[in-house]
């Protein structure tokens, strides 16, 4: 069983964000980076599959500048077997271009199952995994919360509002991973040492044509300070008037 | 040693790392630290306040600490250990103590005071027998040096091991304040082998299995510090030990002191972990607690407090890191370790108290961390050589005059 997991390096969402001088990206200074959460779950699921089978190989792939090697090595220290960096230094916001580069790497790899996060927690486009499946001509089940791979078939569960769906499709296939499926393990110290000896290949990224550009990023306007309308029950009519006429919430 | 990463464009100072200490660590060292940090955040922090109230060491964490490689992490892979550098070992201590000094104490005793002497003074057979199962946490050890009447001056110890004609040993005496005692499968116990020995030259180490006839272990109750750690008294009355119970390469008080140097090295890092936990808590409280219409972090008094805390943490971390690099290079001295243990524990205790105060009434609750760390650090201040004793070690090295005699 050959599995591939696509991993994006993203800033820690707890950080305080500033827009960079370019106006089309965030200022990276002071931010901490790690694997996107959903990609971490995807890596965990893939590793668990090979552990359960006692066989198979998990390849982790990340597109980006050399710093993504650190994120790939984290996946290797969790238990993935080999890693590929698709080297590209400038940030790309077009999910189709990224998917094109990933597809070029994955198409002849003989992978049975390709796992992506449901979305990258920073850009939240929810598109790369779906585009990737389409470019590879494979079936895709998106945002799954449970996964079972047996006898050449993927069985997956998707959560809906107050209900769920069970979906089946034949391998090879692409799945995108929602939360609830597995927590990413923290690498053991032995895993960290072993990761240094695992293969990490660096290849140029063959991005597709860029289909759109990010024009401008902006932070929401600061909320204006609150106002005290008055005190006691005498203030109620004025408050109701303001909620109707100014805030327009009544 | 590592190539400096200080010029690396990707390792700009991060929020929470004003002095960019990350850039002085290798990628592997950072990965190790982050992994232990995740373990502590997930497994230790949520339960530790209650463990502290209950006076309970969380034994349920032992298996995972072993599986993760935290026990005896700087000992060789050939004996089932992680084979890490001393800096990595220090970072593990830092992160464990960010959780609780009791968790770090457990690991310090197991790694530095039990596995290290077996590795350093033990026979090949003792090493093969004990180290792999200690690395996984399947076997737990304790270290018995302190006695009821001999703490800072272990040379005076009364515990005696008498060799019989057939080469076997008979052990008599008592040890007090022994971390992990009631959890342990075996004790590394230090005893004199000769009667007239005021300087402790005949001190040797013995492996005493729990359950040996005449060996009793009693848990120490009523502690107001290090409550999430097991502390015990060991009593030996005519305990018969086989000839091969002795650690063959041990000899003189120097041997247990070598173990203490290892553990103290880890404590210099660990204390910074406790300090970081208190600082982080104080900082976030200062930013969110509003009093007089303002976050209290907006008042000069609290900013001074935070600046003082952070300054001592940065200094202590750099001290520990430099000491670690010297230890990895094989050039460190026990006096350097004394200085780092003395300074870092002392400033950590002050930081914990200031954090407690910044938190107002909330600061006395177990739901917050500062007061637990503050109380714990009083034990750390006393064990592994009290603050005073380390002052005298440094004083002797500097003046050439021995204040102990
Ligand atoms: C929670 C805990 C866990 C421990 N775990 C272990 C363990 O696992 N194994 C172990 O062997 N021990 C352990 N200890 C014991 C610890 O190492 C001793 O408590 C320590 O060495 C001090 O000894 P003491 O308590 O007898 O104090 P004392 O030696 O009686 O000292 C009392 C005071 O006198 C001061 N003092 C002593 N001598 C001098 C001097 N010459 N000049 C000036 N001042 C001096 C000391 O600094 C201290 O302030 C532990 C202690 C604690 C609290
Ligand atoms: C065990 C216990 C028993 C108590 N019993 C009673 C009782 O019987 N009755 C009762 O009414 N109360 C009682 N209290 C409450 C006690 O009086 C308050 O905790 C105390 O007034 C501090 O308030 P606080 O805890 O909200 O801290 P905060 O006011 O939130 O203060 C937090 C921190 O900010 C600092 N700070 C606040 N304002 C400023 C400023 N302007 N400039 C600089 N620093 C500032 C404080 O010094 C402190 O370090 C008790 C508290 C405890 C712990």
Image (tube, grey):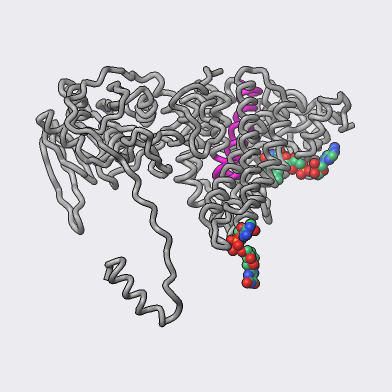
**Which residue is painted at 71% across and 24% down in the image?**
B250
Which percent across, then down, holds residue B7? Answer: 50, 21
Q: Is residue B210 magenta?
A: no
**Which residue is painted at 40% across and 42% down in the image?**
A17
Q: How many marks?
A: 0
**Which residue is painted at 22% across and 29% down in the image?**
A98
Q: In the figure, B3 relative to B334: above or below?
A: above
* Relative side of A105 to B218, left or right: left
Q: Quadrant of ligand 2?
A: bottom right
- The quarter of the rendered structure image containing the C terminus of chain B is top right
Q: In the figure, B324 relative to B51: above or below?
A: above
Q: In the figure, B99 relative to B224: above or below?
A: above
Q: In the rendered image, which quarter is residue B199 located in?
A: top right
**Residue B364 seen:** no
**Which residue is painted at 35% across and 79% down in the image?**
A237
**Residue B11 seen:** yes
Q: In the rendered image, which quarter is residue A11 located in?
A: top left
* Relative side of A241 to B279, left or right: left
- Magenta region's main secondary structure? helix
* Relative side of B20 to B177, left or right: left
- The quarter of the rendered structure image containing the N terminus of chain B is top right
Q: In the figure, A120 relative to B318: above or below?
A: below
Which percent across, then down, holds residue A83? Answer: 31, 23
Nearer the observer, B195 or A74: A74
Q: What are the residue bounds of the magenta stretch?
A: B96-123
Nearer the observer, B25 or A155: B25
Q: Is residue B99 magenta?
A: yes
Which percent across, then down, holds residue B190? Answer: 73, 33
């Amino acid at each position: 069983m050959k599995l591939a997991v696509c991993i994006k390096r993203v800033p820690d969402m707890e950080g305080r964000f500033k827009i960079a001088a370019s106006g089309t990206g965030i200022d990276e200074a002071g931010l901490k980076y790690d694997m996107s959460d959903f990609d971490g779950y995807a890596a965990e699921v893939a590793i668990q599959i090979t552990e359960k089978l006692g066989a198979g190989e998990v390849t982790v792939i990340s597109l980006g500048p050399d710093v993504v090697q650190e994120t790939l090595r984290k996946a290797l220290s969790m238990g993935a077997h080999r890693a590929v960096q698709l080297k590209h230094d400038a940030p790309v916001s077009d999910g189709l271009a990224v998917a094109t580069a990933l597809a070029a790497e994955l198409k002849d790899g003989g992978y049975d199952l390709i796992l992506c996060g449901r979305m990258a927690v920073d850009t939240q486009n929810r598109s790369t995994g779906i585009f990737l499946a389409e470019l590879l001509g494979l079936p895709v089940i998106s945002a799954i919360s449970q996964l079972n791979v047996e006898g050449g078939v993927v069985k997956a569960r998707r959560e809906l509002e107050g209900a769920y769906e069970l979906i089946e499709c034949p391998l090879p296939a692409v799945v995108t991973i929602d939360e609830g499926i597995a927590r990413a393990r923290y690498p053991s110290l032995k895993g960290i040492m072993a990761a240094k000896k695992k293969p990490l290949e660096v290849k140029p990224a063959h991005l597709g044509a860029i289909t759109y550009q990010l024009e401008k990023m902006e932070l929401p306007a600061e909320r204006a300070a609150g106002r005290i309308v008055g005190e006691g029950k005498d203030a109620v009519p004025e408050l109701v008037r303001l909620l109707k006429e100014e805030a327009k919430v009544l | 040693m590592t190539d400096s990463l200080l010029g690396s464009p990707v390792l700009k100072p991060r929020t929470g790392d004003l002095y960019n200490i990350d850039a002085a660590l290798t990628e592997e060292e950072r990965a190790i630290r982050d992994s232990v940090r995740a373990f502590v955040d997930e497994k230790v922090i949520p339960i530790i306040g209650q463990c502290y109230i209950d006076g309970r060491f969380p034994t349920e964490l032992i298996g995972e600490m072993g599986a993760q490689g935290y026990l005896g992490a700087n000992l060789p892979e050939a004996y089932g250990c992680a084979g890490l550098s001393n800096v990595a070992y220090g970072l593990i201590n830092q992160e464990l103590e960010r959780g609780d000094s009791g968790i770090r104490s457990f690991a310090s005793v197991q790694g530095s005071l039990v596995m290290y002497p077996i590795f350093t003074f033990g026979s090949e057979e003792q090493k093969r027998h004990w180290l792999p199962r200690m690395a996984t946490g399947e076997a737990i050890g304790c270290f018995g040096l302190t006695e009821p009447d001999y703490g800072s001056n272990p040379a005076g110890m009364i515990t005696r091991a008498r060799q019989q004609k057939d080469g076997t040993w008979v052990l008599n005496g008592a040890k007090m304040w022994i971390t992990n005692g009631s959890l342990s499968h075996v004790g590394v116990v230090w005893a004199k082998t000769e009667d007239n020995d005021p300087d402790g030259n005949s001190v040797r180490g013995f492996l005493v299995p729990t359950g040996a006839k005449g060996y009793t272990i009693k848990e120490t109750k009523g502690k107001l510090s290090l409550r999430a750690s097991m502390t015990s008294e060991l009593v030996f009355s005519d305990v018969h030990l086989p000839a091969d119970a002795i650690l063959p390469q041990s000899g003189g008080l120097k041997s247990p002191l070598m173990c203490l140097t290892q553990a103290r090295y880890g404590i210099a890092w660990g204390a910074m972990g406790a300090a970081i936990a208190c600082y982080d808590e104080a900082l976030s409280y200062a930013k969110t607690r509003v009093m007089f219409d303002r976050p209290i972090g907006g008042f000069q008094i609290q900013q001074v407090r935070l600046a003082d805390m952070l300054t001592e943490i940065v200094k202590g971390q750099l001290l520990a890191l430099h000491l670690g690099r010297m230890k990895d290079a094989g050039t460190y001295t026990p006096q350097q370790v004394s200085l780092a243990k003395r300074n870092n524990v002392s400033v950590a205790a002050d930081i914990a108290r200031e954090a407690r105060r910044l938190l107002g009434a909330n600061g006395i609750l177990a739901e917050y961390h500062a007061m637990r760390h503050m109380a714990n650090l009083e034990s750390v201040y006393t064990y592994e050589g009290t603050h005073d004793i380390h002052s005298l070690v440094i004083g002797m090295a500097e003046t050439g005059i021995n204040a102990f005699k």
